[in-house]
């Protein structure tokens, strides 16, 4: 959430920057400024009314002490009127503040200056590519056919149990899935990230804290009886561990990792591009989250990018990195890099990770601050990234590593799996 004082001070810059998102910010920013002016005026009026009431209360006490009960009674009537006025002003102030907060929730984060212009994913900027795309033998299959051939993922059984988008992993497929989770967590903890196991459901405050609520696209599963939400990513519970916290500057950076299942309704997703593991309602992901001092956050973002690159290099999967354009970047992010692995059998790129810097946008929602060397409270910067999302990594391994002998397991995963081939 943007800070009101920053909006007031940088209105024209913000209007121009938010235009990169195809977001017409002028009307809403003007309304924010007017509401804030009304809020400050109402607050001043309330403060003055309370001050007058306190002053009269003291005078009443003196008058009663001096035996001037008649004058004291007249002033008591005035204090009653002031108390009623202060109650009305307090209610008005709460209403203005609620309207202002709800309005601020509708404004996306201001994109970083390096975010390219663009309307959609077609305009994202490729910034890095590594790995050779393998040449597959004739008759190479997409992963959903391989899953059926080797009986390692059962999509139809998932439909029977729950519905489309909830696959069942079987035998070596389940073991490979578990191996990837363990490998990702080991890589993250070796890099200095502390591992957490967190709840898979969160309350409304957590959803607002990291920006999943209000849920404009309707992508979250809502458990209405308990007013809880199934998490779309571990980012939500992990980052919310620090909601309403004043952390010690010496404890920064705070680096966290965690594995969770993730749940997304993926409303409106249809067609061949969502077949198999390409897009699911439930999937597994290992996440990394960082809490940083503002001056260090972009260096940290580069470090997170390098960390994911190292994992993909060890898996020997061909991949590329995209800097997302203004029309494709997430609502809460200031800058995002997407990693995509090449699916040889599908002849297309599949997104497997997003690494983002949210600057102070989430921290302002979370009220996540640190005390600097001058004993001043500052908003921290938050970052997160997939390290990694499993479905499309698994799809990439199945398709790119298929041979006449079966599916070869990447060397780095063999100690985790206990086998070299799925056959």
Image: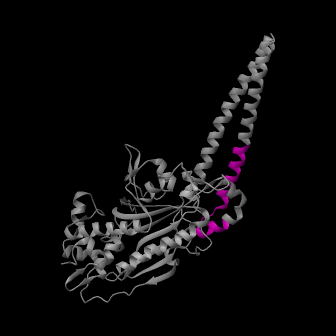
Q: Quadrant of residue 345?
A: bottom left
Can you say whether 161 is above or below 111 in the image? above
Q: Visible in this render: residue 59?
A: yes
x 58%, y 62%: residue:
359
Left or right placement of residue 294 versus residue 346 in this view: right
Magenta stretch: give its range: 15-40
x 21%, y 75%: residue:
419
Q: Nearer the viewer, residue 207 or 194?
A: 194
Q: Visible in this render: residue 349?
A: no
Residue 163: horizontal and vertical position, in percent?
Answer: 27, 60
The quadrant of the rendering that contains the C terminus is bottom left
Left or right placement of residue 104 versus residue 271 in this view: right
Coloring scheme used:
one colour
Can you say whether 49 is above or below 117 in the image? above
Residue 23 covered by magenta stretch:
yes
Can you say whether 261 is above or below 303 in the image? above
Residue 211 covered by magenta stretch:
no
x 74%, y 27%: residue:
54
Q: Nearer the viewer, residue 191 or 78?
A: 191
Residue 209: horizontal and vertical position, in percent?
Answer: 51, 52
Q: Residue furthest top?
A: 67
Left or right placement of residue 54 versus residue 255 in this view: right
Residue 274: horizontal and vertical position, in percent?
Answer: 35, 71
Residue 106: horizontal and vertical position, in percent?
Answer: 57, 56
Q: Main secondary structure of the magenta part?
A: helix
């Amino acid at each position: 959430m943007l800070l009101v004082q920053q909006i007031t001070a940088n209105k024209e810059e913000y209007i121009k920057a938010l235009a990169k998102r195809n977001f017409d910010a002028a009307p809403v920013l003007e309304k924010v400024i007017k509401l804030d002016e009304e809020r400050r005026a109402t607050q001043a009026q309330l403060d003055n009314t309370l001050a007058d009431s306190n002053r009269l209360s003291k005078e009443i006490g003196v008058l009663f002490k001096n035996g001037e009960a008649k004058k004291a009674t007249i002033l008591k009537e005035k204090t009653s009127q002031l108390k009623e006025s202060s109650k009305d002003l307090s209610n008005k102030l709460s209403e203005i503040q609620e309207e202002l907060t709800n309005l601020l929730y509708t404004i996306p984060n201001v994109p970083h200056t390096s975010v390219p212009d663009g309307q959609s994913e077609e305009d994202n900027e490729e910034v890095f590519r590594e790995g050779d795309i393998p040449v597959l033998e004739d008759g190479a299959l997409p992963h959903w056919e391989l899953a059926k051939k080797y009986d390692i993922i059962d999509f139809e059984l998932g439909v029977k149990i729950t519905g489309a988008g909830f696959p069942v992993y079987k035998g070596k497929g389940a073991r490979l899935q578990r191996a990837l989770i363990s490998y990702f967590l080991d890589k993250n903890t070796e890099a200095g990230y502390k591992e957490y196991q967190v709840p898979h459901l969160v309350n409304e405050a957590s959803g607002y804290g990291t920006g999943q609520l209000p849920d404009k696209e309707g992508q979250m599963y809502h458990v209405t009886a308990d007013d809880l939400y199934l998490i779309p990513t571990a980012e939500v519970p992990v980052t919310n561990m620090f909601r309403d916290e004043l952390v010690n500057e010496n404890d920064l950076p705070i680096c966290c990792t965690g594995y969770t299942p993730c749940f997304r309704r993926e409303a409106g997703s249809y067609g061949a591009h969502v077949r198999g593991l390409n897009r699911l309602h439930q999937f597994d992901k290992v996440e990394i989250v960082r809490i940083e001092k503002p001056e260090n956050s972009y260096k940290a973002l580069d470090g997170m990018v390098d960390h994911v690159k190292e994992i993909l290099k060890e898996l020997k999967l061909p991949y590329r990195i995209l800097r997302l354009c203004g029309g494709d970047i997430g609502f809460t992010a200031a800058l995002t890099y997407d990693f995509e692995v090449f699916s040889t059998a599908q002849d297309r790129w599949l997104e497997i990770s997003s690494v983002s810097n949210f600057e102070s946008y989430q921290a302002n929602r979370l009220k996540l601050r640190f005390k600097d060397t001058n004993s001043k409270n500052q908003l921290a910067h938050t970052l997160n990234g997939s390290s990694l999302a499993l479905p499309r990594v698994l799809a990439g391994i199945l398709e790119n590593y298929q041979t006449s002998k079966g599916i070869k397991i990447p060397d780095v995963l063999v100690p985790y799996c206990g086998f070299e081939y799925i056959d």
